Image: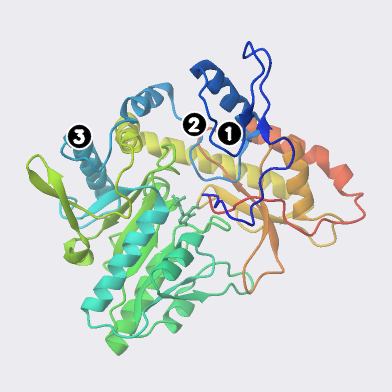
Amino acid sequence: MALAHPSRKPEPGNAEVSVNPLYARVPMHIPKNELPAGGLDPAIAYQIVHDELMLDGNARLNLATFVTTWMEPTADKLMAECFDKNMIDKDEYPRTAELEARCVRMLAGLWNAPSTHEAPGCSTTGSSEACMLAGLAMKRRWRHRGGKGKPNLVMGINVQVCWEKFANYWDVEARLVPMDGDRFHLSAEEAVKLCDENTIGVVAILGSTFDGSYEPVEEICQALDELQAKTGLDIPVHVDGASGAMIAPFCDPDLRWDFRLPRVASINTSGHKYGLVYPGVGWVVWRDTAALPDDLVFQVNYLGGTMPTFALNFSRPGSQVVTQYYNFLRLGFDGYRRVQQSCRDIATSLAGQIAELGPFRLLTRGDQLPVFAFTVADGQPFSVFDVSNGLRARGWQVPAYTFPANRTDLAVLRIVVRNGFSLDLADALLTDLKQMLPALSTLEHARQGPVSFAHGT
Ligand SMILES: Cc1ncc(COP(=O)(O)O)c(C=O)c1O
């Protein structure tokens, strides 16, 4: 959410919204930054807001975001039917609450929880809130174990910003393992080195926002098993599966990253990423009730009784949870498998063709998350920022950014393939990229800074 702040100046130019004379019979003066004194007819107000939004990007050409940009009309219909339902009002909307609980059980089953009926979990506004809840549960468990002093959380420096927020907001030390050479995410060896008696948990990401690679969850768990055998420290793992927890079960069924590993205490995902729902819905599931301390759970009224809840927010719309359930029914396991595999096929094929163009070097190939990062090969006169800028001029949003410590020397482009980014669109992107190359290769000054974008969305 953009923060209104003195450092964010009002837009330069006219202080009034300019209204097309066709929309109203008399000239209108509508201030931009003050609440207008009077109102407007709905049709005029609609047209003004609609026109303001015209310059936003085309969501489906946005290859920066992981978030769903298209749902089918029947899902849109259900969304609209549920905008007015408040998720927290379990008494008024018991069926919405039931659909939420069914989704949790389905996810617990998908992630191989020991018992799908015993695994607690809930919907959230997204993975960020889900990660906060999972982090809080780890922190509280550590306190219950007698933890004293300043708690810490071990993770790779490639974690999404929500984990830095968690550490900052809840006063936990973020122990970040830097990148090193061609290692762009957390390794088991480095994770264990940072653990001590104040470590509330280790976060493993499936997969990394920076390059789409899966972190080695099983190896991390094994290394922590060995640490426990040596020192007695029993450190839980949280898997941040914002994207991958809805990819791996379908495309990599043999990969052991989930509750099959006894050390995995909790898993989150973004329903609004590869769960294929519009923003904002996330999910978090704990392996069993022991992993979620009871004293974090609040009771809300429900049909004369009470229902347990765990959330940072109170009110939020039911639409996303309902359409998550719709997607589960509509697609089933096989439908999700086909959608995700097709994204992966498109990502790997596009990555391969970009590599063949010559001036680029792939860091990842799109064969884990359907996401890949690539950089400009040594000796080219242009930078990733020039490529991003050129693509943006043609309507594509492909972010370029530098990696964090210790690879701040490395700048990459990243492409996220989501449902709706078809092979045809991939071909169109490749054609544009090819057409840009002659002009790029005659550039005299490569752009060094990033074009604005958020890579972790
Ligand atoms: C690994 C990871 N964790 C957490 C998040 C935050 O997700 P959300 O946007 O659902 O809050 C993201 C977003 O990209 C992510 O990639």
Q: Earlier along the polypeptide chain: callout 3 or callout 2?
A: 2
**Disc sitting over residue 93 in the figure:** 3
Determine whether the residue tagged by mark 2 lies in a helix, strand or loop. loop
Mark 1 to mark 2 CA distance (whole Å):
7 Å
Which one is in front in this view, the residue at disc 3 or the one at disc 2?
3
In the rendered image, the vertical position of residue 52 relative to residue 264, given as above or below: above
In terms of depth relative to the viewer, which is nearer, 215 or 177?
177
Q: Position of 195 compared to 293: left or right? A: right
Determine whether the residue tagged by mark 1 lies in a helix, strand or loop. helix
Which one is in front in this view, the residue at disc 3 or the one at disc 1?
3
Residue 94 picture location, percent across and down: 17, 36
> Contact (CB < 8 A) between labels 1 and 2?
yes
Circle 2 is placed at which residue position? 70
Circle 1 is placed at which residue position? 60
Q: Earlier along the polypeptide chain: callout 3 or callout 1?
A: 1
Q: Position of 293 compared to 7: left or right? A: left
Residue type of the residue flagged with mark 3: Tyr
Determine whether the residue tagged by mark 3 lies in a helix, strand or loop. loop
Q: Earlier along the polypeptide chain: callout 1 or callout 2?
A: 1
Residue 104 picture location, percent across and down: 25, 47
**Disc sitting over residue 152 in the figure:** none
Mark 3 to mark 2 CA distance (whole Å):
27 Å
Residue type of the residue flagged with mark 2: Trp
Residue 361, quarter of picture:
bottom right
In the rendered image, the vertical position of residue 416 relative to residue 284, given as above or below: above
Mark 3 to mark 1 CA distance (whole Å):
33 Å
Residue at (33%, 42%) from the top-left corner?
316
Residue 136 picture location, percent across and down: 31, 66
> Contact (CB < 8 A) between labels 3 and 1?
no
In terms of depth relative to the viewer, which is nearer, 71 or 262?
71
Residue 240, quarter of picture:
bottom left
Q: How many marks?
A: 3
